[in-house]
Structure formats: C-alpha cells, structure tokens
Amino acid sequence: MSEAKTMSIKEQNKGAATSLMKKNIRKFLRNKLAVFGLVVVALMTIACVVAFIGGIDFRTPDMANMRAAPNSAHMFGTDTIGRDLLARVLVGGCYSIFIGVFCAVASNVLGAVLGAIAGYFGGKIDALLVRLSELFQAFPQLVLVMMLVAMLKTRGLGNLLLIFVITGWMTTFRMVRNEFMSLKGETYVKVCEAFGMSKSNVMFKQILPNVMTPIIVSTTTNVAYFILQEASLSFIGLGVADSTPTWGNILNAAKNLQVVQNQWWIWVFPGLAISLFVLAINFLGDGLRDVLDAKQQ
Amino acid sequence: MLKYILKKLLMMIPMLLIISFIVYMGLRSTGVDPINFLVSPDVIAANPDNIEALRESLGLNDPLIVQYGRWLGDLLRGNLGYSLDGTPILQTVATRLPYTLELSAYAMLFSAVIGIGIGIISAIRQNGIVDYIGRVLAVLGQAVPQFLVGILLIWIFAIKLGWFPAANRVSPDATNAFVDAFMHLFLPVLTLTIGMVAVLMRYARNTMLDVLNSDYIKTARSKGIPEWKVYLKHGFRNAMKPVLVILMFRIPALIGGSVVIETVFSYPGIGITMTNAITSGDYPVVLVTTLIIAATMLICSFMVDVFNALLDPRVRLDG
Amino acid sequence: MKKKLSRALAMLLSVSMLAAMLAGCGGKTSSSSGTASAGASSAAGSSAGASADVLKLAVTTGDGQSTDDKIPTPWYNRTFAANLMFRSLFVADSTLTKTSPDLAESCTISDDGLTYTITLKDGLKWSDGEALTVDDVVWSIETAKKAAQVNPNYSTAFSYISSLSAEGNVITMVLTSPYSAMMDVLAQFAILPKHCLEKADPLSIESDPYWAKPVCSGMYCVDELNVGNYFTMKVNEHYEGAAPKIQKIQVSFVSDYVTAAQSGIADYVYGNDANLVNTLNGMDNYTGYQIDQLFYKYFIFNMKGVDGKENPAMQNVLVRKALMEAIDRAALANLYPSASVLNGGVPNTDEAYNGFEWKYDLDQAKADLAASGYDMNRTLRICYYNNDQTSVDLINTVVYYLEQLGLKVEATLSNDGTTDLFTTRDYDIGFKGKSAFAMNEWYTEYLSTDGLFSNIYGGDASFDALVADLMAATDSASRKAALTALQNLEQELVYKVPMFIVGTYVFVSDHVKLPDGVSFCNPFYSCDLDFANWELA
C-alpha cells in the first residue's frame, strides 16, 4: 500500500519534470534565433567531424593550381599553395570547435568549483582563491602564452588548451563566488544546513542550481570567445603550429592586403566559418538563457 | 569601509611583487639567451670576445635571483631600467603608454555609451525590432575576428576610399593636430568599439532583463510608478552593477588586448611594444609592460570589489 | 550615521580614483597631442598643398632590423633613407662591384694587393659644421671591429687589416693577405662622426641617443623624429656636392610595404615576396624594376659542433641526399615572382656552373632513404625564421614533400634559424636566406674558422684550401677552377643545399621622376642612384 503511494509521488514528480521539459522545449522552439543557432552549430560540427573522420585531403599542395578561384573541382577555391580550401575549412573547424568547446567547458567547470568553494567556505580559503584569481587575472594572457611557448619550445595544440583553461576560469569564479556569498545567508540554505545536509550537497545541489543560468550562458559564449582568441593568437604568430589547420591559421592569409583584395575566397570562407559559428553559438546561448531563466517562468 | 579599502590597496603590493617575481623567473628560465636576440648570429660568430664582454656588462652572468633583486631595487628607485638594446624603458613607456591610453579611453567611452544604450533598449522592448537588430549587429561585431574587422576597415576606408591613414598615430605632414589625431584614431577606435559593444550590449541586456523580471520591479509596477521611472530608477540602477564589473574588467583587456589591433594598424602603443619585446626576448621591456598591465588589472579588480561592497551590503567586508 | 559617512567617503575615494585614472588618460592624451601639434607646426611650413614637394619613403619595423624609435643605422643593413644621410669612402654602381670615389678623392692599391693608400677630399663637413677628417674614417673602421651589431661583411673584411694609419688627409691601410672585395666593402661601409660617438660603447653603439638626430655626411640630414610614427629629412647645407632637387623627405615607420604603397605613404618600396610584387605590379602608379642579385634561399643540415656533439640522424650522406631529392624545387620556385633554381653556390647561368643538377625524384629518394637505414618513426624537425606568407607557404609545401617519403615532419618557426640549430641541436634542417655581394660569401660559410657555421658542420676543414683559392683568384680561369672544385665538394658533402636565388623588385611611384640611366641595386646595399637629380612630379 505504502509502496504504491511512493510510486505515485515519484511518477507525479516525473510527470511534472516532463511537462516542464516540454514547456522549455516549446519555449526554445519559439525562439527562432536560438533554433537557428542550434541548427547551424549542429550542422557545422557534424560536417566538420564527418569530413575529418572521412579523411578528406586537406594537405596536398598543387603548385599548378595556386590561388584558384572557386570552381567545380574546388568549391571554395584553393589557398596560396593550391590546397583545397573546403577541405581545410572543414578540418580546421574540427580543431577550432574542439578548442572552443574543450576550453569553455573545462575553464567554466574549474571556475564554478573554485568559486563555490571560495564563496561557501569564505575565510582563508576564499582569500587564497581570490588572490590566486587576481594573480591569474593580472597576467596578460599573451605573456603567459609566450612564456609557455618558449618553455615548451613548440606551438602545440596541448599548450594552447592548457593556456586557455588556466587563463579563462576567473570570470566564472568571481561570478559564482559572489553569488554564493550572497546566497549562503538566505534562509533556505540555513534550513538545509540545520537539517544536517552535507556541505557538498548544499553547495552543489542547493546553491549551485541558482547560478547555473549564468554558468551555462558563459560557457556557450566562452566557446565563441576561445575560438576567436585562437584566431587572434594565430594572427600574432603565437597560435597552434601552421601544420595544424585551425580556422585561425587558415584565416592568417588575410594578413596580406593583396590576398584580401584579389583572392577573396582565401579569407571569406574561413572568416565566414568562424563568424557563422560564433554567431550561432551566441544565439544558442541567448536562447538557452531565456529558457533556463527560472525567474521568467 | 575605509579600512577595507585600505586593506585592499595594501594587498596590491605583495601581488605586484609576486607577479614581477613570477614573470621575471618565468621569462628567464625559458632558456632563451637574450644575446641571441640582441646580436645577429653572424656577428656572434665573428666577434665572440665582444659578445662575452657585452654579456658581462649586461650582468647576464650573475645568478638569477641576484639579477632579480637588482632589477627590483632599480625599479623601486624609479629606474625602469634599459631595454636590451639600450633605450631607457621609461622613455619608451612615456611615449607609448599615452597612445594606448588614448586609444583605449575612446574605445571604452564609445562602446560603453553605445553598448549599454542598445542593451537597455533591447531589454525594455524584448524581442522588439531594436532588440533583434541590436542583437544581430552586436553579435555580428563580436562574431567577426577583430583583426579581420581591422584589416577590412583598412582595406575599405584607407585604401579603397583613401579617407583615413592606414597606419601610425601622427602624420609627418599634419597641419592640424586635432584633425590628425581624429584621422589616425578613427579606424582603430572603431575596430575596438565594434568588438566591445557586443560584449557590453549582451551584458547590459541580460542583467537588465534579470532586474526587470525581479519581484521588486513587479512590485514597483504594481504600485503604479510610471514605467520610465521604473526603468531608470529601479531597473537601470540595479542593472548597472554587473555591467560596471564587466566594464572594469574590459579596461585591462583593452590595454593588453589592443595588442592585436595595434599590430594591425601599426599603432605605436604599449601593446605593440610588448609584442615586439616578447618576440625579441627583450625581457626588461616585457617585465615593465607586464607590470603596468598587471597594475592596471589590479586597480580595476580593486574597484570592482569596492563597488560591489558599496552596492551590495550582503558582501562581507572582511574578505 | 557614522557608517553612512564612511560609506560616502569610501565612495568618494573610489570614484576619485576612477576619475584620476581617466584624468591620467585624458591628461596624457592632451600632452601627447601637444607633442603632435609641435610636430605639426614644424611641418606646417610645407602646408597642405605643398605635400607634393615631399618625397615619401617608408621603413619597415618589426622585422628585427629597424625599430620605430630611431633612425635606421647604416652598419648592419643599408636602407634607402640612411643612404641619403651617410656616405662611404667610395660609392658603388648598381652591380656593387665597381666603385668610384665618394668621400675619398682617390685610392691606390699596391701591386701585391696589400697596401691601400686613400686620399680624402678636402673641406668635407658634417651636417653640424664640424670637419670630416681622416680621424673619422680610422675611428669608424676601428669601432666597427669592436661593435656587436655590425654586418659580417665588414667584420670579415676588416679582420684582414693589419695596420691602419692616417696622416694629413691620407689613410694608409695594410692587409695581412689580399682581400679581393675590400673596395666593394669600403663602398658600403658608412663613415660615422667620431666627435659625436666616440664616448659611446661600441657594443651598443646602435642604441646611442645620437640616432635620434644623427649628424650626417650625406645630402640630407634629419629634421625631426617622431617616435613610433615617422622622421623627416631636410637638405644638408654642409654637403659639398650638387644640391638635390628634392627639398624634403618624410619617412614613415610602417609594418609592411604593401599597405604603405597602397595608402600612398611610400614612393619607393622593394621586396621579393610574391604578394608584394603582384600587388605593386597591379598598381598603375608604380613602376617596377627587377634586380638580379644573389639572394640565396637554402637548407642547411645540422651536422655536429666543434665540441663533437653530433646529430646522429643526419650523419649519413644518403639521408641528406634523399631529403633533397624529394623536394620539387622547380615547383617551389613558383611561389616567388622570380626565382631561379640553384644547384650549388654558382647560378646555372654563370660560366663556372659545373652542370650538376638536384633532380626531383621521389623513387630515387625513397631508395636512398631505405639504403641509409634511417629510422622512419623518428620525427624530422625543420626550423625556419622568416614569417612572411611566402616562406610559411614554402615550408608547408616542403613538409608535404617530405611526408611523401613516409617521414614524420615537424616545422617550427624559430626566432633565429642559425643559432637555434647548434644551441639546442633539436633541429635536423634549417631554412635560411642570405643576401650576398658575391658568390664568395656563399663559400666562406664553409670555412672551418667560421664561428657560426663551424658549429653546424663540425669544423670540417675540407673546404678551407679551396675557399682560399677562390679569395686569391684574380683571373677568370682560376676563379672558374676554384668554383668548380667548390661545387663538386659541396655537392658531394651535402652540408647545405641551395633551393634558388630570388630576384628582388624595386617599385617607384609616378610621383617621382627618375633621371635617365638610373639602375637600382640590391636594396640592402648602397649604390649611386644619381639621387641629386631625382624630381617630384
């Protein structure tokens, strides 16, 4: 008897969750920009991954076909040494999207965890972590990149990921910490604590959900940020080695005004790829924010 | 409160020391021999004795910690030292820093006004026409890599149309300093503004939305307070706090991050000086420019803390 | 109440701090526009319409050779602007190998080629009115021997000088052994004023404050330097030759010549990069001049140091041959607007060319590599230091070719392509460029006494005798014999392999009217361009 009753409550909860989910999906689908963003992000990611796994030829130079305009053989034309640009943009997308997603997720997780700890416990741990964040924040990213490049002697993908993660967690950290400091005085937290709930439970199950919206939004926008950052670093010659075709490395050809003027396809396609992806990700982030924002419901 | 501010200020000193120490050791432990950058390799080969003398005269043969102590002592006495090619760094900083500050200040001003303005209007008229156009434009500005925007602006406005100069900050044949400054600053400021507006607009819109959806705004509305007053007095004031935080955080990002834009526009600021110093291994210059940027960043973070404490009494003051 | 007060105070403090920061920006802004207005007022004499009277030049910065806070110094590479300010004892023609007197009145060389007697012109003056004397010449040569930042052309040549003395206006220079290029070197070597620089440390002479407003000997001297932006030059009233027709020159510090030309701030640009040449060729208002010069682009194998530390992977000559056979240099030459494939230090068109050819033959390369027993799992590492798009493209293509051999290849952009080879010995191959006067310089790199390259070839002395033969060769038959022997040896040992020589182009805008008969030389050097008769259209 009693068992049946518990079941029904669980089912009720489940039902409520499904209907909230449905409501959210409906809400998301009503936001045309967000749907557009999701579709573009998904399509581009799939295209890039498929091309990469399919082993598309992005590295064979063709000296007879240097800087060829888009044609039937090369839909996006060829680059300064005759490599197929479509293939390069697709493979470059794999690297760039990976860099963006990996660094955004890793740096936000790092920032959120440290911020939760600092905000919740306060005191010495907080002071230490805040100092640490200020220390990292006070380093120009460029110098850190240079130091690592010089120490490790290679401009590898691994270095770049590491640098982005350790230089990217502070904003989330501050945001989460400040929220935690405000929220931990709230009655419901006190109540949870009074009921003897474990600290990690209070932190991650009770307080953290309240700051999930900004974390999710900042993670999505950070994907875009890191992709752009990679392109900028490549531009000043500190990005991933040239042999790895990231979008930034491909777009590097636009450094030269002659290319900008006369071979539009060399910069327009990688430029479009970056911009479209970043745009889509930002729309997606906005849409997610609108859906997830509990206050709007 | 004053004690809190004072304490925060005092904390900046050890921070700067730690930063200088880490950067110094980091740069020197990379195993890069400054001599290789200072002197061309063919010359090293041709004059090994001269090179050894140069090494000795630059103090490169002492233990690292001694070199750090010497450098720090000089710095505290107001001597910023000399770059490896012999130029006093103070002179370099004095010429270049104003250029960068000028560039950043204008970019900051325009992007704050435009970005926050569009952000607020978008939030008030959510999903309205301004919201859509503003969001698309701002996100476009944020989506196109900044250096590409710069290059395209140079291509269109400096080369195709010939309206603005493509590089530098001062023209040799300028007749009016003000006009000259305007001409040279226009494109780089525009480039930086395009990127910044997007960030500020997003934040202004999002925080304004948060505030407008909050209970006390609803209460205020229900009390019959006029809409404009709700927006201005309750919405704007509360929304500005996080926007200010972001704005503060953008100052150092502007100074340090304008590196790329200074490179694109051959703009003789501190950013391009630092990039060149980094690639040429001129660590005295890297150190000083790093410290300047670090100090700026710390001041901004300090101000964020103070504003936070002032605006939100819940933040404890003993942090 | 009290709390409120302290909060208000704190608010005030932080606001005032913000204000101070902004004021700092503002204050400095206004002070910087103050200097700008000072600059503008000194330039205001030319007025807006008169900018047609100004020749516009540009100096590139950021390539490590010039910086934007001083006048380009003449002792490393010569630049067009500096050539107009600093003169040498002699002046070269466009081949750089025929000289005529400039500061010197005359020069006689003894029959054994060891004693040079140089007479200086009378009444020469620096731009500050001081007399230019033999002391300046002797001081310049002796200081260049001690200076750190000086072109090796000079240090190598001056190391042959055993005694240098001056009396009246005659300089006597005695060499230890004949040095056939001495006159050519003296025609490039700029004489600097002793009275301005004698207190400067020769080791860092290029950063002396003198270079903010140098005292000059040429037809122009510096009018104003605006750090980070430009400098202007005016006619040197103490110049004893015919006064130039162009009264004013402005030189902008730029990051690249293409943008400078396109935005109209450079009437004269040069380069060998395909992008630059194509763009400038496409501009109606520029005329291009192709210059044939010895600009070698080559690969160098990291063998071993004089300390005996060697790079085991490259020791087998078959490996080195295989790598070179796998590269299609004819295809790579397409990357440059004018590149001629090279098989040794001697161009294929020269009569001394020995006929050997590095053929692109992938099968042969694979066979050689298999025969050598090279470990295919090892990563081959290439380093290069030119970061222009053409060099990057070239390296990427080379990596592709070597990957076709089945190798793992990694290319790294380094700060310095030569010293990195032996300071770390992490790289197997370096890619380099060398702008040479003559073939001699290609071959002197092989000398076991060369402090730099001996660290790469392990101080192998097998070239020494042949190079000495070349340096002493006076007639074409002995020169040809020496060059043939050298080519055979270098092709056998395969320490460094040239890809091609790259032609450079000079572009002059139609704003300039050149006098008849001007022919340009290698832009890294100085030669007689009849500049006094240049006019502005």
Image (cartoon, coloured by chain):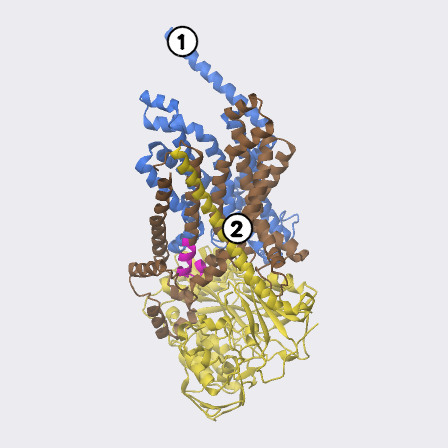
Chain C: its colour in the image is yellow
What is the chain letter for disc 2? Answer: B
Residue A139 is inside the magenta segment: no
The colour applied to the residues of chain B in this rendering is brown
B61 shown above or below A292: below
Give residue C170's mark: none
Instruction: Looking at the picture, tell me which residue is in the foreground, B230 or B247.
Output: B230
| Residue C51 pos. (x, y %) | 67, 68
Q: Which mark is residue A4?
A: 1
* Magenta highlight range: B277-291
Query: Predominant secondary structure in magenta?
Result: helix
Q: Is residue C536 above or below residue C113?
A: above
> Amino acid under label 1?
Ala
Return the residue nearer the eye: A44 or A10. A10
Question: Closest to the observer: B46 or A290?
Answer: A290
Q: Which mark is residue B104?
A: 2
Q: Is residue A164 visible?
A: no
Q: Which chain is blue?
A: A
Judge left or right: residue B3 versus residue C435.
left
Q: Secondary structure at mark 1?
A: helix
Q: Quadrant of residue B281?
A: bottom left
Q: Is residue C221 visible?
A: yes
Tell me where residue C501 appears, x and y as whole percent. 55, 70
Quadrant in the rendering for residue B168: bottom right
Asked if residue B284 lies in the magenta stretch, the reply is yes
Which label sits in the foreground, 1 or 2? 2
Q: Residue furthest top?
A: A1
